[in-house]
Image (cartoon, rainbow, N blue to C red):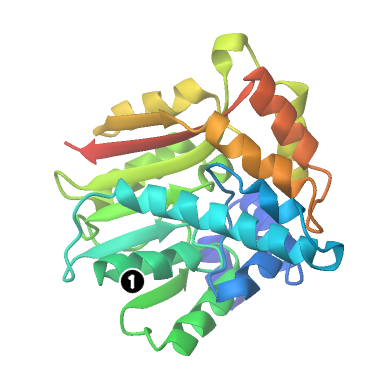
Amino acid sequence: MTDARDQVLTTDYQRAVAAWWDTRRTDRVNLALGEIDGFYHHHYGVGAVDLSVLEGPEDTRDERTLRELHRLEHSQAELLLDHLGPVGQDEGVLDSGSGRGGLSFLANQRFGCKVDGISISQYQVEFANDQAARRAVTDQVSFHFRNMLSTGFEDGSKRAIWTDETTMYVDLFEAFAEFSRLLPRGGRYVCITGCYNDSLGGKSDAVNTIDEHYTCRVHPRSRYFAALAANNLVPVNVFDLTDATIPYWELRQKSSIATGIEEAFLTGYRERSFQYLLIAADKI
């Protein structure tokens, strides 16, 4: 097992990130929402909030709030899948940075395709594979302890690839080079990510706080487009989801899963030093 870890985790930073996720086995932020319906996501939400969840009996207010947060998570996931384009049942897709597997299962349900998920957290891989077994879809959805910079899959083997709030842990030029290798001509890559707005300068205090909290390295917005262009990935759609995600964070701040990082996200989004983008790009 040590040899396998050394092959997947090749830098001290990667080992630190993996350790951070491996030790968050009782993290209520993701678990409390996933327990609602069995879809465990590792991303945030978009869309208008139903503020009526804050009304009514106080003893059930938090339960209503968590359900609403989870609905917004699903909205974000469905939005990403909307931009994958047509995917056939005989085609394969890659969830790069798959967490506990929620989005992979949604993709399989929608397209009926084979889904491979990868993560550098062995705990996440084990958790997600257990979920696949519970759902009886192990012949269609499987999770692997692999590095998104060197996945081991064959050239041109994935019709579509996505990253959902995971690119802040890798070098974009290296990651997009690997995705470009895996996609055939016309294949689709979709990214949802937080990035800092370098048209305003360097990282703001809010973005630095986010980096420190998640052991991540938020990239400047311009670097995404430079790395895509360098690897034959041409954007076909770009959406600024910043305003669409603020309601999620405002509601989360009022919930039992609030951790204190909510204020940094809200400050960054409101001052536009931090942006939430969806980018869909085709391989040429």
Q: Is 176 situated left or right of 60 in this image?
A: left
Q: Is 230 situated left or right of 13 in this image?
A: left
Q: Residue tagged by mark 1?
A: 109
Image location (x, y in percent) of residue 154:
24, 62
Between residues 55 and 142, which one lies in front from this camera angle? 55
Instruction: Give the residue drawn at x 61%, y 49%.
Output: 50
* 50, above or below 263, in the image: below
Q: Residue furthest top?
A: 200
Q: Quadrant of residue 41?
A: bottom right
Image location (x, y in percent) of residue 143:
44, 73
Image location (x, y in percent) of residue 170:
53, 43
Image location (x, y in percent) of residue 94:
35, 60
Q: Is 110 situated left or right of 163 in this image?
A: left
Instruction: Give the residue drawn at x 57%, y 19%.
Output: 197
Q: Quadrant of the C terminus?
A: top left
Instruction: Give the residue drawn at x 61%, y 10%.
Output: 200
Q: Quadrant of the N terminus?
A: bottom right
Task: Report the number of discs.
Answer: 1
Q: Residue furthest front?
A: 56
Between residues 149 and 188, which one lies in front from this camera angle? 188
| Secondary structure state at the residue bearing disc 1 | helix
Can residue 217 be seen here? The reply is no
Q: Is 254 situated left or right of 36 in this image?
A: right
Circle 1: is it few (<14), some (14-19), or many (20+) Cα within 10 Å?
Answer: few
Name which residue type carries label 1: Gln
* 175, above or below 244, in the image: below
Instruction: Give the residue drawn at x 39%, y 48%.
Output: 80
Can residue 177 be seen here? The reply is yes
Q: Quadrant of residue 26?
A: bottom right
